[in-house]
Image: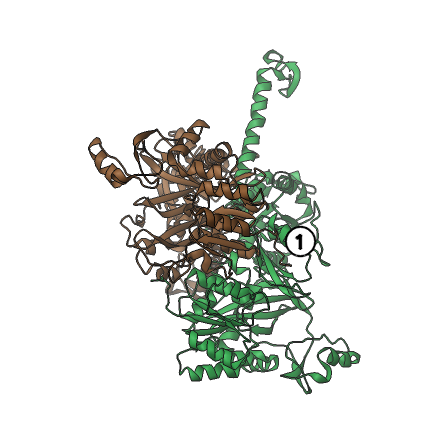
Chain colours: A brown, B green
Amino acid sequence: MSLAPTPKTIGILGGGQLGRMLAQSASLLNIPVVILDSDGPTTLGPAKQILNTSGHIDGSFRDAEKISELAKKVDVITVEIEHVDVGALEAAMAKGKGKVEVHPSPETIRLIQDKYLQKMHLKSVGCPVGDFRKIERWRYDGRGNYLLKSDSSVEAAIEALGGGNLQGGGLYAEKYVPFRAEIAVIVVRSLTGQVVSYPAVETVHKDNICHLVWAPYRISSIEQDPKVAERAERVAREAIEKGFGTGVGVFGVEMFLLDDDSILINEIAPRPHNSGHYTIEACESSQYDNHLRAILGLPLGSTAMRVPSAGMLNILGDSPPNLVTLALAIPGATPHLYGKSPARPGRKMGHITIVGESDAQVRERMAPLLSSDPLPAPPHLLGHSHPHPLISIIMGSDSDLPILLPAARTLQTYFPSIPFEVTLVSAHRTPLRLVKFAQTAKSRGIRCIIAGAGGAAHLPGMTASLTSVPVVGVPVDSKSVAGGGGGLAGVDAMYSILQMPRGIPVATVAINNSTNAALLAIRILSGGIPRLQGEMEAYLERLGEEVEGKVRRMGEGSYDGDGKLEKGVGGWEGYGK
Amino acid sequence: MSLAPTPKTIGILGGGQLGRMLAQSASLLNIPVVILDSDGPTTLGPAKQILNTSGHIDGSFRDAEKISELAKKVDVITVEIEHVDVGALEAAMAKGKGKVEVHPSPETIRLIQDKYLQKMHLKSVGCPVGDFRKIERWRYDGRGNYLLKSDSSVEAAIEALGGGNLQGGGLYAEKYVPFRAEIAVIVVRSLTGQVVSYPAVETVHKDNICHLVWAPYRISSIEQDPKVAERAERVAREAIEKGFGTGVGVFGVEMFLLDDDSILINEIAPRPHNSGHYTIEACESSQYDNHLRAILGLPLGSTAMRVPSAGMLNILGDSPPNLVTLALAIPGATPHLYGKSPARPGRKMGHITIVGESDAQVRERMAPLLSSDPLPAPPHLLGHSHPHPLISIIMGSDSDLPILLPAARTLQTYFPSIPFEVTLVSAHRTPLRLVKFAQTAKSRGIRCIIAGAGGAAHLPGMTASLTSVPVVGVPVDSKSVAGGGGGLAGVDAMYSILQMPRGIPVATVAINNSTNAALLAIRILSGGIPRLQGEMEAYLERLGEEVEGKVRRMGEGSYDGDGKLEKGVGGWEGYGK
């Protein structure tokens, strides 16, 4: 008894890194796997290396006979690459008289193999795709791309795509789309038609090859639609639901996010996808776990992230050779090498996943691996707002800045690892900016807002009413700031901030005490970042030690006649003189 | 070029589940591994199954010749079991003239193999161990244990431990220690002597076999020492630092936590340990990753947890056969099967790790797997305090309960997944209980404290001064509660709670508004539990919809002359009449 949750054996067409990671997931469930791929002269491919069985098949995953041979050995066939012989697959299914299941279905693979057919099909079922047109005259191998900047380079494009020797599918042209970002979503469809998706991620390509992935996708400005990620996930799920009704397993859906935040589908892969490698360390079940579960008819696993933030860097044959060594020194980094050789330029040799408590930490951890990159992450300038803040310090007017600055200084001095921003949002002078700021706070990754306000002091409460992010309110004594006047020692602001109606709380701190607002924000963050509890305890200890020091000095009579602690003066008897 | 961070090949004595999980970690770094273990008649052992190489050795890991054969093939030898032939290991090292490293060192393994020697040695270097005594006359195989309840069962014990046929090491007796809990800590020692530890975990044994692990260890009462976990981690690190100066790699340190919170070392294993399986899914680098890094001289990986809470259940040969099937339906659960057969009672066939946002969620997720357990988790009773709360609602007197109950009701009604407790802590009548409560809050897993108080209202501020956990203060209008009097409409309490000195913030909400305190607590928790953001958005939407409904009714003139919204009365003209 193997305790495996299914008696089925799986066959995989292709034994590269995707097959390898599928096999790793299968081994956790004692599910036997047979790989069809061509062995090298001396070494096995990535997937076969980690499955010690005599059952693997040496041959091309495009070879009909080999596919038939595989079909005889297994119960379910799946693919780790879409460039397989669909006819052979269908023949194997027919010959086996329904004994062998193939997931995803051959018609799904056929539709996806040809980018033009895929686009036509997606358009026909109402999915958003860019403009495109078939070019009848030329034929090519279905894999190349060429960015055509002007008519004059058409000849060069045709040459680059294979010139007169093009064969296979057709050549087609797509309208160039300037985009703000590339987004990808991994979708899983079960045998029973259940469709779930992983969080939307940002992908960064270099020379048409996936370079970096950041998970989850975050908007970078309050001008963006805060629902971009949800929308991308819906577009991706709908593409699989409407477009590939018979497809079972994992799909990688790549999309363009345009400058106006609209979304176009770029392309779909009917298999685990490079943009989903991060799910191994960062999600409750990985894309590989879920591909197996889907094609075996087992319950799908949770696609929720189990860490706050993650990043993934591909290791290519021409990447710096010390990437893995560098990664071993980075907390939260897990290198994955695929057992491939030789290391040709552009060949995917492995990847490195980094997890962390925040986007800022993940990017900081990733930075040493990108130092040789032509486009490194921008450095964070001390005293400037951080590009990936966890805390946002806002106020209605720069005249409040003297009161709010101690919050920024407290964060910078005692909790330098916590990124924050400082900005103006006026409830009364920029009410629409207030709405945008509050509504985008969550999608920008903000976990706590510190809002200072004096007088009528509507900013904290109005912000709280427009977001689920906790808001800490600092009542400002208007008299204490430049141009202030008519203030009531801050009591007016205090009541405005504190006495919120049932349903919308503001965490109010003492009047003018933005230091405490910063400390409260750190306590709030510590629920998700446990190490901050230790840092806060150290801070409290320091406070106590300061007083202990003064205890000693007071005992030694070190104060002057005005009651100021000062070395070398006094004793009780000097007091008041 | 394999891109591996080291050119070394590893040899492992033993090819069971620990070897298998070591091999999985090695495959991520392209590090070649050769296993020495006896092959079954038809199947390979767990570790060999997932390493497709012709280099493995069929033979006993206690066979000196086979060890020599292994030594010729590899650069570093390690063990997945301590019951190896230490003499043969030393001989292999001597023969190889220093070309083969062995980690942990043979002297470390020898010290640990014999429980009596191990205890003597730990005692001699000042580590805390229970009373024990050698019994010269009897010999046994070094693995059995027998709990002796009275003198009359001595004969039965000797019989159970092998009777007159005992051989190998000596028999020894240990004083029975009644304990509160069993704690384990995984320690890693690098080649350069760096010693790091994973978080302390609670282990639950059944019939002397590891059954369950809960990570991290949490105290369960405010009467416990809040520093138990830190202390256990220090005891474990010191045992390795002082006791096994030449040992490199991962050590599993098992300890007893006695009723007075003192700690005794039970035993130490010089290898990855059952209590550390959870680290694969729950920590930034797993114990297997770190064992490899340690013995290869690579930088150690972070031992920090990357999830808030985790649990691990062993699958034994006599466990219910549907455990894996059940686990596939549980979010955050990852089954690991070891490819073993047959399933003999007590044999470790696999394990299931569950991760989650809180202890409560992990235990709830684990519950279906323990339903056949003789000791299931106690059920949580509605209206009672939860045994693993995230929010603690406290007040100085039960007369404040009417004001604080809306907080409990808001949590129960709108956020039923968030466990909380309700209790009394009086700053002035139980000042020492206040200190204990606040100081243990973090170690009990509390992430937010809601403290209500009237009049002088010291409870919230004093609590905040004794913990790093965020405190939400609810000013109570003393006049509004039974026995109240002399109150200043809650303004007295409001100032006491709000106007905290620089350094110690209390998140103050409106007077008597404990509903908002609960909602603020949920916002605070959402930093670590992102799904709560969505739930809070839904709550806010509901608030808005309620008002929209009233907008319609007001337009329809549905209010009476007293200004109450009521169907079928009025219009403007009826107002005030």
Residue at the outermost bottom position? B137
Q: In x, y percent, where is residue A379?
A: 30, 50
Residue at the outermost right position? B152
Residue bearing mark 1: B322
Q: What residue type is labelled 1?
A: Asn
Relative side of A511 to A313, left or right = right
Q: Which residue is drawn at 67% across and 51% down?
A: B368
Work out whether residue A25 can be spotted: yes
Q: Depth check: B241 or A153 in front?
A: A153
Q: Depth check: A252 or B331 in front?
A: A252
Residue at the outermost left position? A152
Q: Which residue is drawn at 70% across and 84% down?
A: B165
Q: What element carries label 1?
A: loop
Relative side of A25 to A40, left or right = right
Q: Which residue is drawn at 56% across and 24% down?
A: B548
Disc 1 is attached to a residue of which chain? B
